Amino acid sequence: MGEMKTQARLMVKKFGGTSVGSVERIEAVAARVWEDIQQGQRPVVVASAMSGETNRLVRLAGEIDPFNRGMAYDMLLASGEQVSIALLAMALEKRGIRAVPLLAHQVGIQTDSVYSKARIQGVKSERLMRLVDEGVVPVVAGFQGVTLEDRITTLGRGGSDTTAVALAAALGSSACEIYTDVPAVFTADPRLVPKAKEVPFLSFEEMMEMASLGSKVLHFRCVELAVKFGVKIHVRSTFEKREGTWVVPEGERMEAPVVSSVTHDGQTVVFKLFPVPFGPGFLAELFEHLAEKGVVVDIITQSQNEEGQRLAFSVNEEDRPLVEKTLQTRLPEGSQVVVMDQMAKISTVGVGMRNHPGVAARFFKVLHELNIPLHLVTTSEIKISAVIDKENLPRAAQSLHRAFSLEED
Amino acid sequence: MGEMKTQARLMVKKFGGTSVGSVERIEAVAARVWEDIQQGQRPVVVASAMSGETNRLVRLAGEIDPFNRGMAYDMLLASGEQVSIALLAMALEKRGIRAVPLLAHQVGIQTDSVYSKARIQGVKSERLMRLVDEGVVPVVAGFQGVTLEDRITTLGRGGSDTTAVALAAALGSSACEIYTDVPAVFTADPRLVPKAKEVPFLSFEEMMEMASLGSKVLHFRCVELAVKFGVKIHVRSTFEKREGTWVVPEGERMEAPVVSSVTHDGQTVVFKLFPVPFGPGFLAELFEHLAEKGVVVDIITQSQNEEGQRLAFSVNEEDRPLVEKTLQTRLPEGSQVVVMDQMAKISTVGVGMRNHPGVAARFFKVLHELNIPLHLVTTSEIKISAVIDKENLPRAAQSLHRAFSLEED
């Protein structure tokens, strides 16, 4: 019974970069954790680097070698979380809470060896459990892992969310809290769509699509792990006490809207290649090389006419230099590359789309009526995406948000 | 024979904070290491945090809790070296040198658990040796260690020097290079004594005294380890190629001057207590409490007359808050404390003092002629120290420097 109680009250709480962005905010987080302990909770805290810190480190690295994404790069970036968990542990100790800051290798957050985009392969729970049982608050560095060869890795942007869910899974917890600077997940980015509303519930599937479509709320791999281990995620505000958005298995929501959100990614670059060799050989080789460099290729389209075969694909702006470098050596003779930047991807997501035909038609109609050209298009069972010019993004987002009734109560 | 060659050409090279203080300087260090490799050297690099970084981290910690010198504090401070070794490894890789950045726990630099002033107890050489044998340059984080319980510790200010000597000892190397922003050790601080000269050779013993007397050139513990393992230390400039100062066993120097240097510590605070209880009981208890808090008490004097017993001792300014906190609870009723700040300690050091009586007399005569009051005095076989008002420091240093013929060639 005592053990069950421990389990029941254990809660992994992840605080993002803005939540620990200054000494004052770190103190506020510590005060909040203190209150939760008074309420009987036994917290396991995960923290990101102080906001701005990771960017500062990336800039430093870029001054030396903008292409290095290896062992040294990951060690560099991992230092950001080390600073924030140490400061947070000090702020907890000051309040009389026994706290122990822990790096990935100290916990045993084991990953593969793909630097800068490593995947968690296992988490050792023994040390964490022992600390929690002793009444200590573990304060764990998010975003980082360690390989079997004792090398430090990082999990990619937003990786701290993944750390939190992986810890919750390892500790046998059925939920985890992701504290952030917004009060909940919204039907669209409020900066883009002023009428955007809070979403009380989202399905894992929708959240996964949103994450992969560029919504900054949760990391894709984090939701993937949550699905795998059945960990519900509560996205909520660090600065307010009310409930935010629960991300849960599909069956647990009363009623699913056709479209739950309009999501966008304002950092898209499109590469167009013409002509390219016929057949899948060239494509296989090209995308294999890009994958080896860690480039995530998003939408790929291929078409042909009598003039030859055309290839277009989109990537995140961040990966643009890596793609350009690869194309310098991999491009067939005579082939031309056009790089289209200032692009954005806009998407609508909703599990209800499965049972409601005509969503795609309405999506295209809205953009057509606004005279917005589509550069690339892709669809899945529960989402439709199009790459458009970035300047058209606000109009497109607002119109789609309205057209899919996301403004109504 | 091949193995001997490896040993012979292996060189631990430690670069201080100013040497890696910017991306440009890190590039310069990498270029220098590259040249040494072309000359056939097999370097093991140790780096401090970028200059200013440790102070920034200490400031952040101080905003949360100026008294915390525990586990979290050490984890915080250790992040500084993590950044510099990662950047330096990237700069080496960019030059086609295989480099692997290594934190203390990855090397196996084992220490005791006295946070913020930990002592190295052993260094595992296997991983380092394997890397060197594979033609890889290990880039090791200075200043940090790891306890048997896998906690991160730090070695105190200047601890990177100690790391370098400990690595050289573990690797069976007979020498190690300490690169710094000055070209050599000087007979006095040139900012204080413009006529100060470079010292080509110093004995271990003199360097130990100088380190413990506040000379910033080498860490005390570093020289202690160098003596223990017979590792000669070459203190030299990062920015110039010529030889600096060799710190060697006494016998290896041709001729020892009576006094080798005038050393000072401008960060001294004197506590005077009156009256204190008779007998050693109170003193034992007080200094035990200070030691537990990690305070290094420097000079202690005790005197008594018919009015009662007086106690005076000096500490580094840094430890002043810890001493004041201890005295708040440990001071006997009726006892008064006087804190004297703006103090400095000035010393003359030289193994030649052993065979030349009259050095102390000359030391006191010089200060007397300058009308400089002495607050505390202490002597050893090879040094004389006095605590004086900080405002008198330049005059005292210059006069002593002249009086002991350190200006002559």
Image: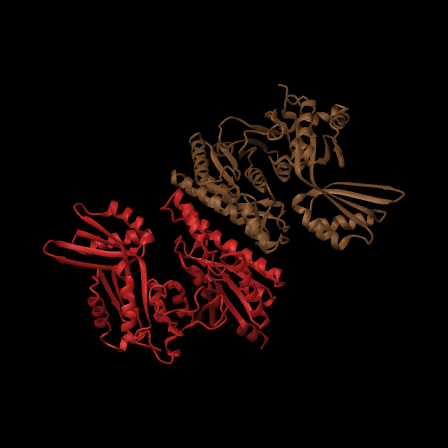
Chain colours: A red, B brown
Image quadrant of residue A233?
Answer: bottom left
Judged from this view, the residue extending furthest toward the right is: B306
The spot of residue A86 in percent (x, y) is 55, 55
The spot of residue A142 in percent (x, y) is 47, 59
The spot of residue B131 in percent (x, y) is 46, 42
Is B49 or A189 nearer to us in this picture? A189
The vertical placement of A332 against B169, above or below, is below
Quadrant in which the N terminus of chain A is drawn:
bottom right
Looking at the image, which residue is at 56% across and 72% down? A6
> From where the camera sits, is residue B136 visible?
no
From the viewer's perspective, tell me whether residue B98 is left or right of residue A9: left
Judged from this view, the residue extending furthest toward the bottom is: A254
Judged from this view, the residue extending furthest toward the left is: A306
The vertical placement of A134 against B199, above or below, is below
Looking at the image, which residue is at 53% across and 65% down? A44
The vertical placement of B210 against A189, above or below, is above
From the viewer's perspective, tell me whether residue B307 is left or right of residue A171: right
From the viewer's perspective, tell me whether residue A313 is left or right of residue B34: left
> From where the camera sits, is residue A345 visible?
yes
Is A400 or A117 nearer to us in this picture? A400
Image quadrant of residue A88?
Answer: bottom right
Labels in figure, total: 0
The spot of residue B282 in percent (x, y) is 81, 50
Quadrant in which the C terminus of chain A is drawn:
bottom left
